[in-house]
Image (cartoon, helix red, strand yellow):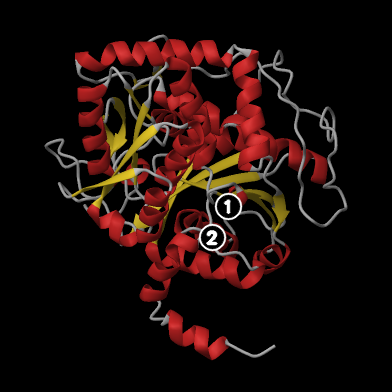
Amino acid sequence: MSDPSDPNQNTPAGAGHPRGHGQGSGQGVLLDLPALRRAIPHPPDPFGRFGPYGGRYVPEVLMAALDELTAAFEEAMADPSFNAELDELRRAYAGRPTPLTPARRLSKELGLTVWLKREDLLHTGAHKLNNSLGQHLLTKRMGKPRVIAETGAGQHGVATATAAALLGQDCVVYMGEEDTRRQHLNVVRMRLLGTEVRPVATGTATLKDAINEALRDWVESVGHTHYAIGSVVGPHPFPLMVREFQRVIGEEARAQLLDAAGRLPDLAVACVGGGSNAAGLFAPFVDDATVRLVGVEAGGRGPGPGDNGAPLNFGQAGVLHGARSYLLQDPDGQVLPTHSVSAGLDYPGVGPEHALWKDDGRVTYTEAGDRAALDGFQLLARTEGILPALEPAHAIGWLAAAARAGTVTPGSLVVLNLSGRGDKDVETVASILGMDAEENAEGGRHDG
C-alpha cells in the first residue's frame, strides 16, 4: 500500500522536524512541525465512495450545497493562504502541536511501552476543534453567516461554539435530551459562548436524533447556513473533509514518535464512534504495513440489540445520514437504539472509510463494554494522574485487557489517542461507581 512518491513516507527519525526535543527529555514530545502540503492521499472516487461505502444519499435540495462545499474544500486545500491561516489558528489559538506523552507507570503495569497522543490538552479539551477550525474557515470562505451542528458528548458542540465565537458566526447546536442531561456542563459552556442549544426529544434523544434535526434545519436554511458535521460520517465530502482536518493528529504522532523512539509504533489504537479521532490517527499510518491499527467501539452492556454502539462489530451495511456504511439495524432495516456509558460513542453508524478499512482487513475493530471503559478511566487516573474522557477510556480499557491476555505482544510500542479529557464525565463516573463527590472532597481535604 505504500506510495514511494509520497515525501512523508518512512521519514527518518528527526528528519525535517526542527526544534524536536523529545529524545531523552523525559517530558513527552512536542515538535513544531512544518506545514507540509500535498495532494490528498487515499481520496474517495468521484462519487465520494470508499469502495462500496460512502456516497450521497440526500434530498435533491442539498446536492447543490454539497457540490459547493466540495469545490470550496478542494480549492481551500490547494490554497496556501487558507492553509497558512488554518496552521496559525492551530498553533496560536488551539495549542498545536499537542504532546506525545510517555505513560511510564501505565506501561510498567501493562508490560508495554505506551505513548499518549494528548488531544485532551487541545483548547476546548478534545480533538474536535481540529475539524471545527477547518470547517468554520470554509464557512467564512463561502460567505455563509450561520453554522449548525449536532453533538453527543458535547465536545463537538463546544468546539463549534468556540470557532463560531472566534469568527463571529451565528451558531445553533442540536443535542439529544438524554445527552443534555449527561453532559450538562458542555451545554452550559456552549451557551456561555453565545450558541443556541436546541434539545431534541424525538427517538432515543441521543446523537442520531440530533443529526436528524440538524439535517432538517439544513434543508430549510441551506442558502445561508453551513452544517458542520462533527465526524467522518454523512454524505460526501464530509467523511473526506473531516478526516483531512483531523489528519494532523496522526501526522504529529508519527513524527513525534520517530523523534523520540527512532521508529514507528507496533500498534496505534483509538476509540471509534462516528470515527473522527480514529481516522485522524490512522490515516497517516495506513501505508505503514508494520503498524497494527485497532479501533475500539462501545460494547455497552453486550451484543444484544439496543445494548451497544458497535456497528463494525455487530452491524450490517446500510444507509444512514446520507452515506452507506455499517450500521446497527433490525432485520427490516430499521435503525436500532444504542447504548454506551459514553455519550460520544452511542451512534448506530460509523464513517464509510472505517467500513472499507474493516473489509480490507487494514484495521482491526473490536469493542469494550461499559465496565471496561470505567476500568480504563480509573486505570489512567491511578497510574498517570490523567482523567480521560469516557470515549478514549474504552481504548485504554481494551488495551489493558489485551495486554493482560497476551493478545498484544509484551514490550510492544503503542500510541494511544487520548482524544478528550474527562472533566465532562466525572459526575457520570462518580454516580456509577457510587461515589459522592462532595463527601470524597471533604474526606480528602487538608490544611496547608
Q: Is 82 located above or below residue 181 in the figure? A: above
Secondary-structure class at tag 2: loop
Q: Is residue 293 left or right of residue 8?
A: left
Q: What's the mark number on residue 388?
A: 2
In which quadrant is the N terminus drawn? top right
How far apart marks 2 and 1 lie (CA) works out to 8 Å
Give the number of the disc on residue 120.
Answer: 1
Q: Amino acid at mark 1?
A: Asp
Task: Say which label, 2 or 1, has the lower sequence index.
Answer: 1
Q: Residue furthest right?
A: 24
**Residue 113 or 185: which is nearer the viewer?**
185
- When asked about the image quadrant of residue 196, the answer is top left
Tag 2 near tag 1, CB within 8 Å? yes
In the image, what residue type sits under mark 2? Pro
Q: Nearer the viewer, residue 291 or 31?
A: 31
* Residue 360 image position (x, y, % from top left): 47, 28
| Secondary structure beneath label 1 | helix
Q: Residues within 10 Å of mark 2 (few under 14, many from 20)?
A: many
Task: Establish if 372 lies above or below 57.
Answer: below
- Residue found 23% across the figure and 20% down from its top: 58
* Figure quadrant of the C terminus: bottom right
Q: Is residue 88 visible?
A: yes
